[in-house]
Amino acid sequence: MAACEPLNHYLRAMEEMLKQINIHSEEISSFAASDADSLEQFRIKFLGVKGLIKAMMGDMKNVPVDRKKEFGQIMNGFKNLAEEKYESEKLRIRQLGAAPRSHLDSSLPGSPMPSGSRHPVTLMRNRIVDIFQRLSFTVAEGPEIEDDWHNFTALNLDENHPARDMQDTFYLSTDPAILLRTHTSNVQIREMQKHQLPIRIICPGRVYRNETISARSHCFFHQVEGLYIDEHVSFADLKQTLYFFVKEMFGEDVKVRFRPSYFPFTEPSAEMDISCLLCKGDGCAVCKRTGWLEILGCGMVHPNVLANCGIDPEKYTGFAFGMGVERPALLKYGITDIRLFSENDVRFLQQFSGV
């Protein structure tokens, strides 16, 4: 009987520990931290250096030798339960911003989300596109990385044509025949190659030229080019189309003039000026004291360009025009530095939230 007393003592101690484990397991499972402080108290109580689990591990000496493995597995499960509960509650508190629940007022309105705005260049592009769509022009797009033929050769600029020097081009070092397009005329070529006549398109997009960045120029900018090809298209059709555009864009009072010019892909060619919107034609620094601002180039599509695309120049004629988007945006919104369009200054962009 005397030999059984120590064994009975160990068994009673183990039963008491198992009872405590069951009680505390229920406490752990039902625990929900109200804030970071209550979570820390949970950690100290169960997982701290002087915590409950550490103490119970020390009481393993009271477990009979033949039951230590079994009891050790129970203790490891109890410890894992406490650790998993601590980590899950820590993540939940962190997602709540570690703010005490008692300080949260669900009746308060949410934080305001400021509304975004379209970029001024996008606003101007959309305005230009909308005007021409009212004249039944459809939007066509093409690649910004282009081959030499679509960007130059098909447009009547052969390899040694001096007009190529007018457009400082970014070529890909891996293949000098591949480049960043210098205009959206490459889209016009691709559309003409489809031979789906008549063609009445506008081609908006970003273009690239190796130019010095300043208040008036940039190495990338945006263009909208137009093309109309059909039978019996004349220069008069071109002028009336552009007259309509200018009146819709800048108002009925703006004055317009056409000046003869040269472009390899059109013949005859012209540049279109409008009276300066800032000085009303009196002369200022923006218009270089002339009272006029050039806004686009235009002309009748050169027969060679039509032939390069497989269109019979004896049967079809057409006109083309092209304009930058940044310059009208500068005039429209009174902006004096083109670099502002690409600096992503939120203070600048927020001015257009109500436009």
Image: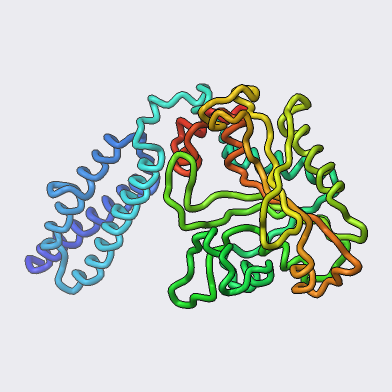
* Residue in the picture at 78% in, 26% down: 252
* In this view, 273 is above or below 104: below
Pick the front one: 288 or 57: 288
Left or right: where 238 falls relative to 56: right
Residue 320 makes an appearance in the image: no
Pick the front one: 86 or 179: 179
* Residue in the picture at 70% in, 62% down: 265
Where residue 125 sits, quadrant-wise, is top right
Q: Position of residue 351 (x, y in %)?
A: 53, 28
Left or right: where 216 falls relative to 193: left
Where residue 147 sits, quadrant-wise, is bottom right
Q: Residue furthest front?
A: 260
* In this view, 5 is above or below 257: below
* Residue in the picture at 29% in, 54% down: 83
Quadrant where the C terminus is found in the figure:
top right
Q: Position of residue 170 (x, y in %)?
A: 48, 64
Q: Position of residue 8 (x, y in %)?
A: 16, 62
Residue 16 makes an appearance in the image: yes
Left or right: where 350 falls relative to 257: left
Quadrant where the N terminus is found in the figure:
bottom left
Q: Position of residue 113 (x, y in %)?
A: 53, 31
Pick the front one: 239 or 137: 239
Colour pattern = rainbow
* In this view, 157 is above or below 139: below
Count every numbered label the image shows and give the total: 0
* Residue in the picture at 54% in, 73% down: 178
Left or right: where 134 falls relative to 80: right
